[in-house]
Structure formats: C-alpha cells, structure tokens
Image (cartoon, rainbow, N blue to C red):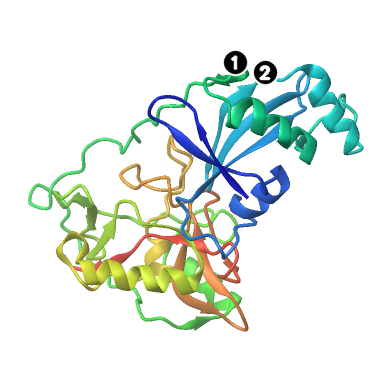
Amino acid sequence: MLSQLKLNKTTVVTIDWDMTPDLAFCTFSAKGLREELINTTERSCYFFIDNWGDEPKLCLMERGVRYVHILAEITAPKEIVHACLIRQGTKPSTRGNSPIDDTLKEWLLAEVVEREDSPYLLLTIAPQPEAEDMGEPLPSAESSSFTGEKIILPSEPRAVTEEQVESLIRDGNFYDVRLNPQGNFANALTDSGDELTVLDQGTGLLWQRAGIDLCSIRTMKTRIEELNSAGFAGFHDWRMPSPEEAMSLMEPTANAKGMHLHPCFSKEQPFIFTNARRTPTGYWFVDYAQGRIYWSSGTVPGGFCRLCRAQ
C-alpha cells in the first residue's frame, strides 16, 4: 500500500507502508541487494521507530542504495509510540529500530499523511552532497613526461584459478594486500580533456573516471551494451577490464577517499567486476577499498564496474 505525503510546498514523497527497517536493509544494503530493484537510484520512504536514544522516536526514513536520510521526525504523543512497541513485544528501553503496526499506521494516516500542515511533522535538513575531490589535475597527453615502453596487459575474457591469480599478481608486480604487499605497478595517467576518462600511457588503456553502479553480472552486460550504443566519450568499444588491467590501477597506499586508487578515479565504484570467471565457479573482482582481488558469485549483490578500452 502506498500513500502520498506532502512535506512542503514543493516536495511530495510516496510512503511505502509495507516497508520495514529489516526489509529495507535486505533490499538496499550492498550485502543484501535484491534483484527486483529497478535500479540502484531507486529509493523508498517509510515510517519506523528509532529506539536507540533515551526515548523512542517516530521517524520518516528515505532509504536507497548507499543513501540513508531521516526526512522528518513525527512528534507523536509518547504513549502512542510506547504502545506500538509493547504490542510488538518490544520494551521502550530496547535498543534498535522497530516497524510501525496497524494501529500506529492509522494514527499516522489521520494526523500526518492526510492532515494539511500537520503539527506533528518536524522536517529535518537534507544533507547537501559534496563534490568529490578528484585530486590535482593530471598532465595532458601532450605534456606528459612518460618515455617508457607501453605494457600490453592480457585483455581477453577467460577462466582463472586461484593459483593462476596469485601468479598473475606477482608476475605483474600488482599490489595486493595479501598476495603481493610489495607490489607497485607504475602508471602514467594523463587527462583526456573530457572530464569523463583518463588515459594510462603506460598500458595504452583509456579508463572511465567513474563507472557503472552496483548490479548483477547480467544487468552489467546490458548496461555496457547501452553505454556502447550511446557512444560514451565518443567510443563504442568499452568493456570490462581483465584482472591484470583492473589490478594495474591498484595503488599500494589508500588515498584520502579510502581507495587504493589515484584520486582522479571516483570512490563510488569501490569494487569492480573483471571479465574473468573463476574456476570452478564465480567471477573475479578487484576491491580498491580493501586493496585486493577476490571472487564472488556475481549475482547478489553483484558489483560495480569501471570500463576500459584500448586506445
């Protein structure tokens, strides 16, 4: 069941009465992301009881993937909120988040949702997104001081065992916190001038500065097709990187954003798909937050991706 709630003159939100704190976690958290999400920009608004403080608070939450914001506190009479907790077998002193029940829902409908300028609706200030720090400007390709030979890394999709992954990490001198903590592959990153891509003259690879949002391997392949059809940054041959290509961006030291990457790359793709399957099952991922390569199923939660192409 859904209802419309007018927060102010310009903002109306849709209340999902079936959503609960537990269901929201299973739906939107990276570890529990559900396949039925239309996309990872989807958000849900629902009422719940915040019971972490000295007194339980009735709140309106907006929840999405990597997004959590309390839109409003509902200043309901204390006895109404306490009674809801007790009916669910929870003490007002129990720490945690609790769903509302049908009785509290009826009160909310009458006193908040369907009431014009409800005195119980106390709006909070939405956080303003900060522009991501992309580090110092990169040199242009023309002004780059790189004079070395270009290293051509393996790029074809293939199946890779765990033993082969260990070898390719060491052979390529790629940093991995567990497999090769002394690794340090040298890049020669240059600015492509379009604010969308970065060219590594050391490998001849053009990279997305950002990438594709969290999704399953099946959805990822569809999004890559759509991106190529649209001609992202003027090209139609973007692809997933191989393990070697993805690991070539790994920095031994985490940057100020907590990523083992040059700061010219966005932090919003903390772990990415590679084009390699794991033998006997799964897919290989590169985790820039943890500084490592690992494998997972590729379905739920899936992964992000930073695409590349040979320049």
Discs 1, 2 touching: Cβ within 8 Å: yes
Q: Residue at x 51, y 65 (%)?
A: 285
Work out whether 164 lies above or below 130. below
Q: Image height check: is 290 above or below 101?
A: below
Residue under label 2: 75
Percent across and percent down for residue 78 are 79, 18
Labelled disc at residue 119: 1
Amino acid under disc 2: Thr
- Residue 229: x percent and y percent? 23, 72
Q: Residues within 10 Å of mark 1 (few under 14, many from 20)?
A: few
Q: Nearer the viewer, residue 15 or 153?
A: 15
**Left or right: 260 with respect to 131?**
right
Left or right of 114, for residue 157:
left
Outermost residue to the left: 142
Question: For the residues marked 1 and 2, what is the alpha-carbon distance in whole angstroms?
Answer: 8 Å
Q: Nearer the viewer, mark 1 or mark 2?
A: 1
Which badge, 1 or 2, comes first in the chain's sequence?
2
Which residue corresponds to the image point at 43% horizontal and 47% vertical from the top-left?
Answer: 268
Kind of element beneath mark 2: loop
Q: Secondary structure at mark 1?
A: loop
